[in-house]
Amino acid sequence: MPTDPEEKFVYHSEWLMAAALTQSYRYMIENGLECSKLATREADVFLLVKEDELHTLYYVYAYKSRKILKGADIHTINQNSSIFRIIIVGWNVYN
């Protein structure tokens, strides 16, 4: 385990993210869910498990941009935004 404060912070952050992904993946498998989402204040992580590839957890990371939430229309939404990613993930999963 790192002793440098910055490296220690990164280590613990990565450990917590791995734990959250593992818990979500297990829940998805146990309950037969194809899609799920992890949400934090700063980002969303969209999860997908395909029926024929249960050993693989697909994910899309989407940064939440507060700028686009005020009066944005579909033509001005940033492609890296969480809202855009929700639209694309939903489109790809169900089409």
Image (cartoon, helix red, strand yellow):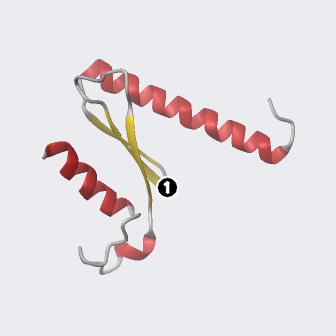
- Residue 65 found in image quarter: bottom left
- Across and down, in percent, residue 42 comes to 51, 57
Using the image, determine if residue 34 lies above or below residue 66: above
- Across and down, in percent, residue 36 comes to 32, 38
Which residue is found at the position 48% from the left and 50% from the top? 40
Q: Which class describes the residues within 10 Å of circle 1: few (<14), some (14-19), or many (20+)?
A: few
Left or right: where does residue 22 sit relative to residue 92?
right
Q: Residue furthest bottom?
A: 71
- The amino acid on which the numbered mark 1 sits, given as a three-letter code, is Arg
- Residue 93 found in image quarter: top left
Quadrant placement of the N terminus: top right
Which residue is found at the position 35% from the left and 78% from the top? 70
Q: Residue furthest right?
A: 3
| Residue to which mark 1 is pinned | 41
**Towards the viewer: 50 or 14:** 50
Q: Secondary structure at mark 1?
A: loop
Left or right: where does residue 91 sit relative to residue 11?
left
Which residue is found at the position 39% from the left and 64% from the top? 81
Left or right: where does residue 57 sit relative to residue 1?
left
**Towards the viewer: 39 or 84:** 84
Left or right: where does residue 40 sit relative to residue 86?
right
- Across and down, in percent, residue 14 comes to 62, 38
